[in-house]
Amino acid sequence: MSLLKRLTVGAVAAAATASLFTISGTPAYADTRCGASGKILINDGEGGEAPSRQWGHEHTTGSHYIKKTENFAHYKRYHWWADNDNPLLPGRDKADTLHGKKDCPLSSIP
């Protein structure tokens, strides 16, 4: 096989591999939404805050929940927080941190 052909085959394989990683989705840290479909259990590990159920969603990399909702005349603002609870570590529940804010339609749930 000629050098040009080998380089072309290698470039096509590299591009195909890169596209597999690109289309796999957005990481959890970038996820704020307009509302939540249900309540999740947060802070269920030892340490940190007391366990509770909050509106939110879960990922394999962690959970996010709505800690505060502000209502305005034409929209509502959700304050999303990260539940920093790592099941792989002892004393695993660390203090939760602000994840982001999202302005949403008034019809968003909750």
Image: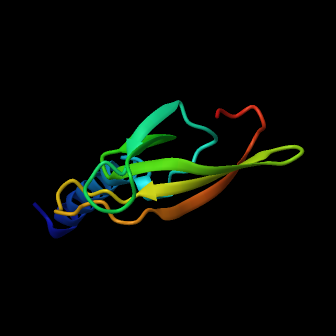
Which corner quadrant of the image does residue 46 belong to?
bottom left
Residue farthest to the bottom, as pictured:
3
Residue shown at the point (35%, 62%) measured from the top left: 48
Along the line of sight, the residue nearer the viewer: 15 or 61 = 61
The quadrant of the rendering that contains the C terminus is: top right
Along the line of sight, the residue nearer the viewer: 41 or 37 = 41
Which corner quadrant of the image does residue 73 belong to?
top right
Residue farthest to the left, as pictured:
1
Q: Is residue 47 left or right of residue 1?
A: right
The quadrant of the rendering that contains the N terminus is: bottom left
Q: Position of residue 101 (x, y in %)?
A: 64, 57
Q: Is residue 3 above or below residue 56?
A: below
Q: Position of residue 3 (x, y in %)?
A: 16, 69
Q: Position of residue 54 (x, y in %)?
A: 50, 41
Residue shown at the point (76%, 46%) measured from the top left: 76
Residue shown at the point (42%, 53%) measured from the top left: 28
Residue shown at the point (32%, 52%) measured from the top left: 61
Q: Is residue 91 above or below residue 24?
A: below
